[in-house]
Amino acid sequence: MAQKKRWNEISVVSRWRIVVLGIVQLALQFVALRDLVKRPAANVRGSKGAWAAASFINFLGPIAYLACGRLRNKK
């Protein structure tokens, strides 16, 4: 079994990648949850609660909601 590295044992480039990916993940989740709160339930494909829970799945959840979970605004 591979031994886990501590933060200070990881290269600077790898640390930056981790930080940037973390920021991207949080930004995607923020955008998805904000849109979900502001969008009427009639404009969401499926349950708002299920999409909110799915948004906590790394990258996949927020991207899935933004790509497939929203319906066009009804006029």
Image (tube, rainbow, N blue to C red):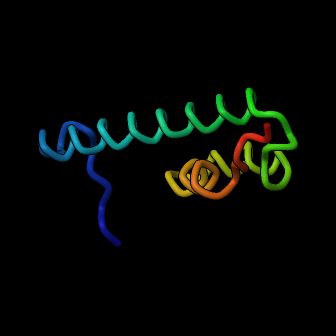
The residue nearer to you, when weighing 32 against 44, is 44
Q: What residue is rendered at 13% in x and 43% in y? A: 13
Q: Position of residue 60 (x, y in %)?
A: 54, 57
Q: Position of residue 5 (x, y in %)?
A: 26, 50
Left or right: 2, with 51 as reference point: left
Question: Which quarter of the figure has residue 10?
Answer: top left
Task: In the displayed orientation, state which residue is furthest to the front.
Answer: 75
In the rendered image, which quarter contains the C terminus? top right
Q: What residue is rendered at 83% in x and 55% in y? A: 46
Task: In the displayed orientation, state which residue is furthest to the left.
Answer: 12
Question: Which quarter of the figure has residue 67?
Answer: bottom right
In the rendered image, which quarter contains the N terminus? bottom left
Q: Position of residue 64 (x, y in %)?
A: 60, 57
Give the total of numbered labels: 0
The residue nearer to you, when weighing 13 against 46, is 46
Q: Position of residue 15 (x, y in %)?
A: 22, 40
Q: What residue is rendered at 74% in x and 27% in y? A: 38
Q: Is residue 42 above or below residue 27?
A: below
Left or right: 33, with 12 as reference point: right
Left or right: 13, with 62 as reference point: left
Left or right: 61, with 11 as reference point: right
Q: What residue is rendered at 39% in x and 34% in y? A: 23
Q: Is residue 15 above or below residue 50?
A: above
